[in-house]
Image (tube, grey):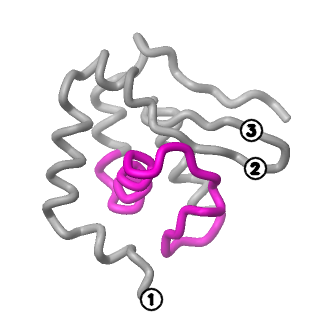
Amino acid sequence: MKPLHHPDRADIQLSSVLYALSDPVRLYIVSGLHRAGELACGSIEVPVVKSTFSHHSRTLREAGLIRVRVKGTQRLLSLRTEDLEERFPGLLKSVLEAYDSSGDKAAFVPEE
């Protein structure tokens, strides 16, 4: 398996981060990672098929928002909070606070 590309902190571009956060599913994933820390891909419940989830995680990874770590057969996702805070102070916090208060995430929360 070839290694996954993660941009260096200095190479994270604001336009790429904002583009990645513009999709509701990706924003939901980022919000979940912010609350839970590191999560396995299979434990994140989103209303998309596996290949679409892979596309979303790749977009987030290549934008510099998440780090993907391979452990055996699992891929573990974590938010690059420190890198994002260093590059764009307060951006992630502002976006997540606005997202949490918007009620948009309710569309993706599975019913019990």
Q: Is residue 78 above or below residue 5?
A: below
Across and down, in percent, residue 72 comes to 84, 43
Helix, strand or loop under label 1: loop
How many neighbours does mark 2 have within 10 angstroms: few (below 14), some (14-19), or many (20 or more)? few
Query: Which image quarter is the N terminus in?
Result: top right
Across and down, in percent, residue 11 comes to 43, 15
Residue 70's label in the rendered image is 3
Residue 112's label in the rendered image is 1
Does the stretch in magenta take in 33? yes
Answer with left or right where residue 34 lies relative to residue 4: left
Does the stretch in magenta take in 63? no
Place residue 63 in its image quadrant.
top left
Q: Distance between the residues labelled 2 and 1?
A: 26 Å
How many neighbours does mark 1 have within 10 angstroms: few (below 14), some (14-19), or many (20 or more)? few
Answer with left or right where residue 34 lies relative to residue 105: right
Q: Is residue 30 above or below residue 66?
A: below
For the residues carrying marks 2 and 1, which lies nearer the camera in this image?
1
Confirm or deny contact between disc 2 and disc 3 (CB under 8 A).
Answer: yes
Under mark 2, the amino acid is Gln
Under mark 1, the amino acid is Glu
For the residues carrying marks 3 and 1, which lies nearer the camera in this image?
1
Place residue 104 in its image quadrant.
bottom left
Q: Give the range drawn in magenta.
A: 21-50
Across and down, in percent, residue 99 comes to 21, 56
Q: Which residue is drawn at 48% across and 44% down?
A: 37
Residue 74's label in the rendered image is 2
The residue closer to the viewer here, 19 or 97, is 97
